[in-house]
Image (tube, rainbow, N blue to C red):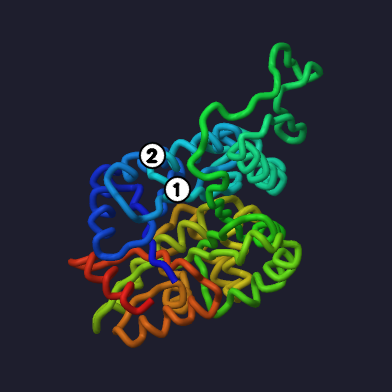
Amino acid sequence: MKIATPLQYADNPRTAADEVAKLEAAGLDAVWVAEAYGFDSPTVMGYLAARTERMQIGAAILNVYSRTPALIAQTGAGLDVLSEGRALLGLGASGPQMIEGWHGMPYDKPLGRTRETIELCRRIWRREIIEHHGITDMPLPAEKGGRLGKPLKMLNHPVRAEIPLYVAALGPANVRMTAEIADGWLPHLFVPEKAKDVWGAALADGTAKRAPERGPLEISAGTLLAIGPDAAEIRESVRPLIALYIGGMGAKGKNFYNDVARAYGYEEAAEKVQDLYLAGRKREAEAAVPAEFCELVSLCGPEGYVRERIEAFREAGVTMLNVTPVGPDPARLIAQVKSWL
């Protein structure tokens, strides 16, 4: 099992990237750089490539709407050459709130777009001459307004013909596709004890169709990390994050995170949190998040307890523990956990 951390994208990205670079010396294996509706992740990833030597640098996530498949492939290849083969690309459909609210694009064909983007990225990195007609047309045909375009192949030679592609997926159909064609899976608000009941069938169905040469599916999941006698109190700080996602990331009936909370067995709480959050009562929404939910997604407590939680993630198939260390010495926490893995 590897250890990773998410870059704190709400902070100054240069300062946050400098702090992550320090964690590399403590044993950090990877960093995931989100963008949401903040700074773009590839710019920060390029800076991280220059500031680090060993750890992998991942985008989490590049949505498949605001960039064309060709641009995603170009971005991945550029980051991979700058990092000397350390890039990871996390892709995802995001959700209606982000795609329609921020990017001003219709949220249509999420699974088809993701599958097509993965296929085209791999073909582009192999430097094939690309002629493809689906959701994306390359080149644009005359009947859709194309006039001068002709099939092209990538000008540069990528470091790797295949950069690892992870998919942020929660719904059964998306998880099934991820298990079939992706290199890795990025589940959010992952509860290891409940994962098999929620996603087991979808993972098994997708794996049955998986090409053997692709190898086992990697899984990157985790959340807050704090170790010590008083660390259990720190898990309370995950409440705002859970409330934001299950309460505010989408309208009623169109919130994937809320669906996951319900699938975990928190139907009543998920309903209450969403109602309060959408009504603007955020503090009450946070208070309504079940304490058990906060505990099961976290790695906060005495040393023995945290080690047990890590084993629960391992038994659930997690291959990369993605943690946010909380405390006066994050590097010590990373080194301590790294020694257990």
Amino acid type, label 1: Ala
Amino acid type, label 2: Leu
Res. 71 mark: none
Taking the image as shown, residue 178 lies to the left or right of residue 11, namely right
Residue at 75 percent across and 62 percent down: it is 209
Q: Position of residue 69 (x, y in %)?
A: 61, 36
| Residue farthest along the top direction in this orientation | 147
Tell whether label 1 touches label 2 (CB within 8 Å): no
Q: Is residue 146 above or below residue 252?
A: above
Q: Secondary structure at mark 1?
A: strand
Q: Position of residue 314 (x, y in %)?
A: 49, 77
Tell me the residue that label 1 is attached to: 87
Q: Position of residue 37 (x, y in %)?
A: 45, 41
Q: Secondary structure at mark 2?
A: helix
Tell me the residue that label 2 is attached to: 82
Q: Where is residue 285, by image quadrant?
A: bottom left
